[in-house]
Amino acid sequence: MQTIAPLWLWIVFVAFVLVALFVDFVVLKKQGAHEVGVQEALKWSLAWVVVSLVFNALFWWAIKDISGSTAIANEKALEFLTGYLIEKSLAVDNIFVFLLIFSYFSVPPAFQKRVLMFGILGAIVLRTIMILLGAWLLEQFHWVLYVFGAFLILTGIKMWFGADAEENLDDNAALKLLRRLMPVSQHYDGEKFFTVENGKRIATPLLMVITMVAITDVIFAVDSIPAIFAITKDPFIVLTSNVFAILGLRAMFFLLQAAASRFHLLNYGLAVILVFIGTKMMLIDLVQIPVSVSLGVVIGILAITMVWSAKTAPNT
């Protein structure tokens, strides 16, 4: 798998991620279980965006230094930014499902942060594996691009027609399987994943929630990862843009939790984005759509959908 990124930049990226996880699992853990407010969520959302942009600036400088070309550095940095924005936008749909899971299991607000922390850790590991596998497949079999493209188009169409459908976990196959595999307590035991009832060690609902969050992220990764491969085939750009979008997922969840109803039409916009990206991938050998155009289309669709959602949002 070929990448334009030098080894030292891979090391810096890993360091970024380790520091971020240290902040989440060690520093913020000292706050204890508490409900995350809008102001705190907004502050951390902006912080993660700034960190991502700083890394992109470092990436731009590294590519310019290696290639000696500002044009190449601009192109690669734009690929990162486009991939990051696509992941961020598709993560919104992920968040709506998380809201459904938390509501279904009646997860106390004070425990939701811990669930998302472990969910993010699992997402980073699983997506890294999937991205490296996807990069290898594209390198060995070019025709996989067409498979990815067709899949994204079909997913976008399905998302469009199912945008207003009511989500229901009662018939979820994964949830039914989990309940068969493990006995689960009817009550939470703080932030513990296991508890003891009648002398037996059994799972708490919190473990079930984390497992469902992990399964959900894998399902959504199947959609989002091919979407970034339509922008660039460089595994470094695909991985870094994906991971930086994931790192800000927890803060974005709490930020959107209070305003979920105002984005009730966002799924339509995401559906159009997936169809556009899938079409771009299908036509890659016939028409080369510049990354700047792709970025403009994604931003335009998101802006139109958000304005449309705000104007038609139900009064609360």
Image: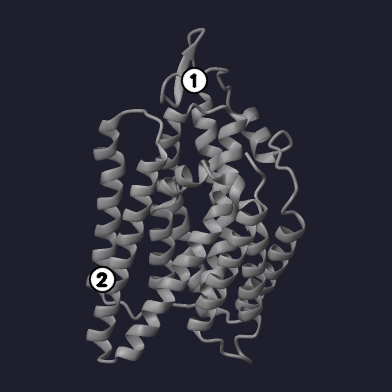
The residue identified by callout 1 is 188
Residue at left offset 59%, top offset 32%: 103
Q: Secondary structure at mark 2?
A: helix
Q: Is residue 263 above or below residue 155?
A: above
Residue at image x 64%, y 56%? Answer: 311
Q: Amino acid at mark 1?
A: Tyr
Q: Are marks 1 and 2 in contact (CB under 8 Å)?
A: no
* 30 sits to left or right of 209: left
**Residue 276 drawn at (x, y percent):** 64, 75
| Pick the front one: 208 or 104 | 104
Mark 1 vs mark 2: give the one in front: 1
Quarter of the image with the C terminus is top right
Q: Quadrant of residue 244?
A: bottom left
Q: Which residue is mark 2?
A: 9
Residue 130: tell me if it is visible.
no
Q: Which mark is residue 126?
A: none
Q: Is residue 193 visible?
A: yes
Disc nearer the start of the sequence (1/2)? 2
Instruction: Tell me: 25 left or right of 271.
Output: left
| Residue appearing at x 37%, y 42% in the figure | 39
